[in-house]
């Protein structure tokens, strides 16, 4: 039985040593790597660039449209178009080439409103890309500190196995000399088995933590890194109102929603301008080397076209009403987002304060648990207590070490969450 326990112990120890090896990775390196390769970040960047191209598309209405044509026609003698139109133009034999030009002169502000609408949407997409960056950075920070916590707990588990193995060996040797009972040996072996189970679970948790870190980095493989510890941040700020105001000013999602509201308002103005006339200049020029007799070879013409909407079954009125209602809906979405941001900042601040207070408490807990274990070991070695008391003291210290490691990295993760809520995680 002891040989089997030693085998498991050696395998776990070798696996733990292997888990500690790997390329070094700091938090800043992890964040930079995620911003370079994470699909969500790249998708947001491409969407923002596409939004800028939409602005160019709408702005193109300001510039002339020129296209060239080459036409060749052969018709029956005396033929005319008799159906499909109100006029009956003559079809002439010809072969001609020329250019046509169309230039918008004014539509009384509709194109200008559409350009501003597209531009505001493009800026909103840029803020959306910034939000994607912040989301990815938050996931990286959380996964990084979770992996650090998993590594720390693995070290605690390995130390626990080492300590309990030593106790089990000592109790076994004393039992062979009839200085300890078989019950003590059984308790020592049970404690060692529990420590080995803790080590096994810690190994699994570390592998899962590195898999989560790899996903946060945007990479398919999940290597094990030698993570660099980050210094503890200072205590959380105390002024809650100032933090809420900062979040409403700095958060990219809030800025993006406000831009979307302005874009919707501009689009409503553009839809109202549908009722205004549109004035355009038209021109055509070319040459017809093969033509009917009596028609000149070169040709050219220029004109002004005024389009005035008269009636269309209330289509424009409905479009304007729809755009106005959507603009009002965007206004309410901004209010809702601001309320949620205020709530999230307050909750993140409370969590950060709680995590900061937990640091001192876990340090005190570990100090007291260490003293209690030392006293329990001394009493047990002097024969003044049973191994049950020693086992409970060892268990309490192991829990205290895990709590201390968890408190440290949980606080760092909570401060990253607070930075995200404030809009400073960029």
Image (spheres, rainbow, N blue to C red):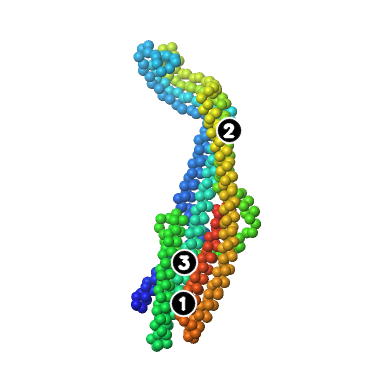
Front one among 354 and 73:
354
Location of mark 1 (residue): 391
Q: How far apart are marks 2 and 1 (CA)?
A: 77 Å
Image height of 231 relative to 66, above or below: below
Q: Residue at x 55, y 57 (%)?
A: 417
Residue 276 visible in image: yes
Say what secondary structure mark 1 lies in. helix
Where in the figure is residue 276, as x and y percent of width and height?
A: 57, 26
Location of mark 2 (residue): 269
Q: Residue at x 54, y 43 (%)?
A: 124
In front: mark 2 or mark 1? Answer: 1
**How many neighbours does mark 1 have within 10 angstroms: few (below 14), some (14-19), or many (20 or more)?**
some
Image height of 243 relative to 273, above or below: below
Residue 116 visible in image: no
Label whose residue precedes the other's in the sequence (1 or 3): 3
Q: Decide: marks 2, 1 in contact (CB < 8 A)?
A: no
Image height of 185 relative to 327, above or below: below
Q: Residue at x 41, y 24 (%)?
A: 70
In front: mark 1 or mark 3? Answer: 1
Label whose residue precedes the other's in the sequence (3 or 2): 3
Q: Which residue is drawn at 57% across and 42% down?
A: 332
Label whose residue precedes the other's in the sequence (2 or 1): 2
Q: Decide: marks 1, 3 in contact (CB < 8 A)?
A: no
Q: Which disc number belongs to residue 170?
A: none
Location of mark 3 (residue): 151
Where in the figure is residue 138, as x and y percent of width and height?
A: 52, 55
Front one among 77 and 328:
328
Q: Distance between the residues labelled 1 and 3?
A: 24 Å
Q: Distance between the residues labelled 3 and 2?
A: 58 Å
233 vs 24, left or right, is: right
Where in the figure is residue 44, as x and y percent of width and height?
A: 49, 47
**How many neighbours does mark 3 have within 10 angstroms: few (below 14), some (14-19), or many (20 or more)?**
many
């Amino acid at each position: 039985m002891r040989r089997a326990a030693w085998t498991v112990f050696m395998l776990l120890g070798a696996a733990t040593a292997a888990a500690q090896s790997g390329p070094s990775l700091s938090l800043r390196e992890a964040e930079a790597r995620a911003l370079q390769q994470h699909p969500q970040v790249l998708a947001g960047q491409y969407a923002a660039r596409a939004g800028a191209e939409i602005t160019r598309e709408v702005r193109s209405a300001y510039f002339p449209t020129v296209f060239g044509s080459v036409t060749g026609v052969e018709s029956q003698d005396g033929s005319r178009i008799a159906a499909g139109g109100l006029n009956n133009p003559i079809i002439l034999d010809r072969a001609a080439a020329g250019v046509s030009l169309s230039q918008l002169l004014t539509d009384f502000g509709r194109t200008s409103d559409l350009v501003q609408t597209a531009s505001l949407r493009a800026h909103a997409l840029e803020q959306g890309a910034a939000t994607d960056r912040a989301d990815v950075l938050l996931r990286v920070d959380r996964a990084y500190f979770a992996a650090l916590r998993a590594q720390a707990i693995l070290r605690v588990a390995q130390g626990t196995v080492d300590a309990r193995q030593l106790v089990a060996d000592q109790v076994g040797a004393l039992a062979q000399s009839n200085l300890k009972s078989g019950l003590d040996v059984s308790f020592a072996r049970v404690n060692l088995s529990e420590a080995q189970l803790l080590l096994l679970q810690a190994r699994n948790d570390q592998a899962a933590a590195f898999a989560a870190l790899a996903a946060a980095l945007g990479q398919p493989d999940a290597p094990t890194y030698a993570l660099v510890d980050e210094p503890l941040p200072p205590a959380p700020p105390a002024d809650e109102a100032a933090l809420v105001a900062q979040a409403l000013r700095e958060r990219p999602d809030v800025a993006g929603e406000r831009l979307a509201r302005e874009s919707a308002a501009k689009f409503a103005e553009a839809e109202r301008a549908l009722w205004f006339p549109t004035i355009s200049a038209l021109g055509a020029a070319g040459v017809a080397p093969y033509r009917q007799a009596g028609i000149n070879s070169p040709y050219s013409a220029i004109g002004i076209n005024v389009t005035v909407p008269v009636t269309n079954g209330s289509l424009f009125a409905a479009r304007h009403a729809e755009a106005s209602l959507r603009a009002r809906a965007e206004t309410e979405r901004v209010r809702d987002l601001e309320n949620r941001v205020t709530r999230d900042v307050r909750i993140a601040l409370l969590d950060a304060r709680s995590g900061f207070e937990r640091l001192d408490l876990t340090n005190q807990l570990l100090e007291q648990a260490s003293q209690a274990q030392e006293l329990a070991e001394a009493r047990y070695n002097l024969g003044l207590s049973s191994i049950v008391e020693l086992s409970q003291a060892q268990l309490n210290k192991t829990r205290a070490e895990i709590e201390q490691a968890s408190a440290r990295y949980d606080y760092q993760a909570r401060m990253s969450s607070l930075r995200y809520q404030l809009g400073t995680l960029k």
